[in-house]
């Protein structure tokens, strides 16, 4: 597993030696050299996304979401949630049954999408399949990456959105300026 501390320079292989840059011509190509990926500038439909500072219809509500998230997502809260949910005593179901539950969930943290999460899962898996047709494991990863959002539903604890969706950040340490909407924590 690789955890990036700094923002990657797109089109440049992450993890190269200082001063050495390895630029890849085809930004749609999945590069798995020494376990490292090149992150494309755009999605498979030619659109950029996840611009949290861009003006848009959802921008004000996304900013409010992150303010609430940053205030409440504490080390103590995370420890309580780990204790509660590590019991694994909720329900057993198939992946598809879980996907269907996300018909009821719209992610308040997403500046790009205001559709039910099942659409996001299917769009993600399909975009990955289109770009990387031979990477079955990656298609599945795209499909299941947000299944934890069922925690928003009453039968799974009905946690607030700030506790489940959005970007995640380390807790128990200083809040980094690279975090999404870091400024709202100080207002």
Image (tube, rainbow, N blue to C red):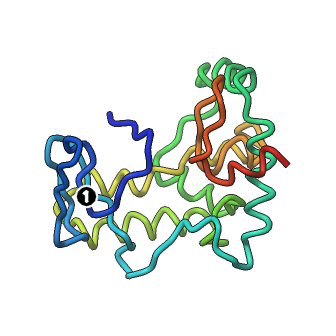
When asked about the image quadrant of residue 158, the answer is: top right
Image position of 173 (left or right of 7): right
- Seen at 26% across and 57% down, the residue is 38
Q: Height in image: 55 above or below 117?
A: below
Split into 4 quadrants, where in the image is the N terminus?
Answer: top left
Q: Residue at x 29, y 54 (%)?
A: 138
What residue lies at 18% left-to-right and 72% top-to-bottom?
A: 26
SS at circle 1: loop
On the image, the x and y values in percent for residue 163 come to: 72, 40
Query: In which quadrant of the rendered view does residue 173 lie?
Result: top right
48 versus 90 height, above or below: below
The percent coordinates of residue 168 (x first, y second) are 59, 42
Q: Quick check: 153 left or right of 27?
A: right
Relative to 169, 123 lies left or right: left
Tell which of 92 and 187 is nearer to you.
Answer: 187
Question: Quadrant of residue 139 in the image?
Answer: bottom left
The residue to which callout 1 is attached is 12
Compared to residue 92, the image places residue 111 above or below, namely below
Residue 76 x %, y %: 74, 20
Q: Residue at 64% of width from left, 47% of height from top?
A: 150
Q: Residue furthest bottom?
A: 46
Local packing at callout 1 (Cα closer than 10 Å; few below 14, some 14-19, many 20+) is some
Q: Nearer the viewer, residue 68 or 127?
A: 68
Residue 141 picture location, percent across and down: 37, 51
Q: Is 118 or 172 nearer to us in this picture?
A: 172
Q: How many marks?
A: 1
Q: Residue furthest right?
A: 187
Q: Is residue 108 above or below residue 165?
A: below
């Amino acid at each position: 597993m690789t955890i990036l501390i700094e923002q990657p320079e797109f089109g440049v292989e992450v993890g190269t030696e200082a001063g050495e840059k390895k630029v890849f011509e085809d930004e749609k190509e999945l590069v798995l050299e020494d376990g490292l990926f090149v992150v494309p500038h755009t999605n498979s439909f030619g659109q950029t996304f996840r611009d949290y500072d861009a003006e848009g219809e959802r921008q004000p509500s996304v900013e409010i979401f992150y303010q609430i998230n940053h205030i409440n997502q504490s080390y103590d809260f995370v420890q309580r949630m780990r204790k509660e949910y590590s019991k694994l005593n909720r329900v057993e179901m198939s992946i598809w049954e879980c996907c269907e539950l996300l018909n009821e969930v719209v992610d308040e943290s997403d500046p790009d999408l205001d559709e039910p999460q099942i659409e996001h899962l299917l769009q993600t898996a399909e975009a990955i399949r289109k770009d990387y047709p031979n990477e079955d494991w990656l298609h599945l990863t795209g499909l299941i990456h947000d299944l934890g959002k069922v925690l928003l539903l009453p039968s799974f604890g009905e946690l607030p959105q700030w506790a489940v969706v959005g970007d995640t950040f380390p807790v128990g340490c200083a809040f980094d300026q690279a975090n999404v909407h870091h400024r709202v924590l100080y207002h």
